[in-house]
Image (cartoon, grey):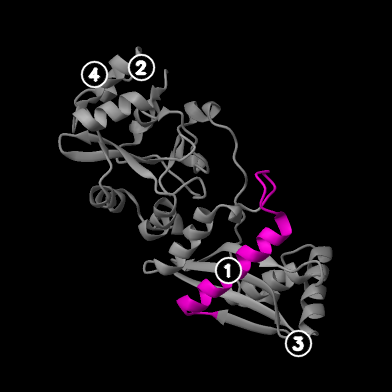
Amino acid sequence: MKPIGLRQYKELCQTSNSVFLLDFLTKNLLKTNGLSKIASGLTLRIHSRPDKCLRLWKKFTNKKSLFESWDFRVSFSDAWEQEKYFLTLYRKNNPIGLLPLCYDSEKRFEWFGTEWQEENKFYKKDKNLFPLLFAIMPYPIRCLSIIPKNIDKEFLNRFEPDDPQFFVDLKNFKSIDKYLVTLSKKHRYNFKRDYQTNLDKKPEIRWGESIPEQLKYLEFIKTLSLKRFGATNRKSSSQFRHERYFQSFVNVVKNQKEYSTRTLVIKMRGAVVAVDLIAEFNKKSYLLQGASNLEHHSGLGNFICYLEIEDAI
């Protein structure tokens, strides 16, 4: 299938509220590759108005994940000033398929909310709509972190494996000791040793609940990240070299309604040595950002993980 370029999409947005999908596929993809029967009677519309995009988002998402929170996603989209392109398939006036996209400053399409988002989907009310949603994806495009089971099996070879998502299911554990038993003997020993070593230093442990306090310590995360990884344009450098990246998480903290955020702050001898920013949504905790002074405090990473797992339980 031939990818659809930005020009055709901008022309569609500017000149028409709706086009028959079959006509659009035939004109722009040259070959429908068996999609004619599925596409017959459907129309394609592209929405950019925030109020309309919000209504579509609420219609298609089930809010099982933080990444399906509009307030969370729009925090990033607003910071990067992205133009929304919600590609929507309609049967009559009923929306049945959705690709929630944005146009990025790097001159490409990506998921609404920047490439930072995870657990992305091709939203569809009809199980056989995936080929059509795949066919209307514009070009150039870079869509990361798609849930594999959301992709039709015959299309899996069109996608590259993504980085793994790290997730720990704690709902069946009544204490952290019960969880630690599931780890290997060596891992469990190191985990408990690092926890005790740092606990013996009598750290001050604080969970920051207020928005001003969270914003204050978000600045610490930015400063320590830039100090540790640098601000050059190399891939290994801190993403906080981009002011819009920092603003994204400022927005996340300020926009909390559907979700909540907290900071875990660790101090040693009065000095801040570690801060994590955590979101909580639908009985799940998400580690969003963090920075630690690992150079002078061995095992601090395991100490923080211990506290966060214990808190989540």
Magenta stretch?
208-237
What residue did someone put label 1 on? Answer: 219
Q: Please say if the residues under marks 3 and 4 sit with CB atoms less than 8 Å apart.
A: no
As measured in the structure, the alpha-carbon distance from the residue carrying label 2 to the one carrying label 3 is 65 Å
Q: Which of disc 3 and disc 1 is earlier in sequence? A: 3
Q: Please say if the residues under marks 1 and 2 sit with CB atoms less than 8 Å apart.
A: no
As measured in the structure, the alpha-carbon distance from the residue carrying label 1 to the one carrying label 3 is 25 Å
Q: Which of disc 4 and disc 3 is earlier in sequence? A: 4
Whether the magenta-drawn stretch holds residue 309 is answered as: no
What residue did someone put label 2 on? Answer: 29
Q: Judging from the image, what secondary structure is the residue with disc 3 in?
A: loop
- Tell me the amino acid under the disc marked 3: Lys
- Tell me the amino acid under the disc marked 4: Asp
Q: Judging from the image, what secondary structure is the residue with disc 2 in?
A: helix
Q: Please say if the residues under marks 1 and 4 sit with CB atoms less than 8 Å apart.
A: no
- The quarter of the picture where the N terminus appears is top left
Residue 78: image x %, image y %? 39, 53
- The quarter of the picture where the C terminus appears is bottom right
At x 62%, y 55%, the residue is 166
Q: Eyeballing the image, is 25 above or below 219?
A: above
Front: mark 1 or 3: 1
At x 82%, y 74%, the residue is 193
